[in-house]
Amino acid sequence: MVIKSKDNPKIKQLAKLISSKKERLNSGNFVIEGIKLLGEALAENAEVLAVFASSSAIEKYSSVLTLAQNACEFYEITDDIAKKVSDAKSPQGVFAIVTSSYNGLDAFGDTDDKILVLNNISDPGNLGTLLRTADAVGISSVVLCENCCEVYNPKVVRSTMGSIFRLKIICEESFKSISGWFNANDVKSFAAVVNMQAESLTQIEFPDRCAIVIGNEGNGLSERDISLCDRRLTIEMKGNTESLNASVAAAIIMWEMTK
């Protein structure tokens, strides 16, 4: 059976999950789009509830979609519906509904020794890039706080290129509570700042258990949150540039912290 109407209840639910943060929060589910993300989700044993694939996608991506058919509910849709529902610039006609996983501070464990804290990161593309970079350098735990954009926003999910399924993502409203947990568990926190009075990144020897804290793209970290960190670090600039994009700065710091 092929779903041919965009008014089909399952298509309406799929579209709502793509467009509405409220719907994602209320349902506890989100949508991934594209064959690579679906393959990553299945490989990492994510809880995939349902897959929707266009007629042409079924022909083109038969190997991965056959796995999906055996793992969850599967619906064939028309190419026209796939184009209408898609949030991507170049739709592949593959969508999946996946159960979201929101963790609190109790998800931290003894093996969480290198941690990335993202404080009020507002751009979905930046957040996705930061998560992907954390995965690439071997950081397994990322904390989102102080009004970070939603981790299951379709643009964030797409930008992670599958890393979202390999990371432990902890969401906490206040950085103060995160700082308290760090202090109680001997995790040393480093605030990334643009301040030549701070410690130079290249001179720091990171302790076994530590966290770097990255602030908002335009405004950085608040003075309050900087004061809650154990130390301040900065990337010394050799040219005329005053600061770096948040995701670029974080990538450099994470590399130094984990190398």
Image (cartoon, rainbow, N blue to C red):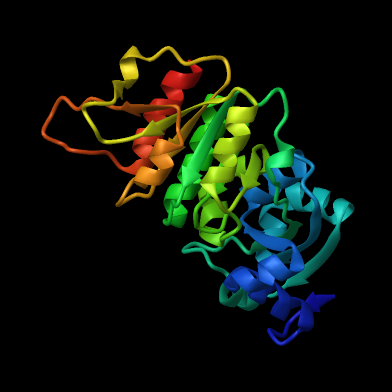
Which quadrant is home to the N terminus?
bottom right
Q: Is residue 61 left or right of residue 180?
A: right
Q: Position of residue 257 (x, y in %)?
A: 46, 20
Q: Position of residue 226 (x, y in %)?
A: 39, 38
Q: Measured along the vertical axis of the image, is residue 187 above or below residue 48?
A: above
Q: Position of residue 230 (x, y in %)?
A: 45, 27
**In this view of the protein, can residue 252 be seen by the observer?**
yes
Question: Which quarter of the picture shows residue 91?
Answer: bottom right
- Residue in the picture at 68% in, 84% down: 6
User: Exactly how many numbered labels are in the figure?
Assistant: 0
- Between residues 101 and 107, which one lies in front from this camera angle? 107
**In this view of the protein, can residue 160 be seen by the observer?**
no
Q: Residue furthest right?
A: 70
Q: Position of residue 184 (x, y in %)?
A: 64, 29
Question: Which quarter of the picture shows residue 194?
Answer: top left
Q: Is residue 172 left or right of residue 156?
A: right
- Between residues 2 and 50, which one lies in front from this camera angle? 50
Q: Measured along the vertical axis of the image, is residue 19 above or below residue 135?
A: below
- Residue in the picture at 74% in, 57% down: 98
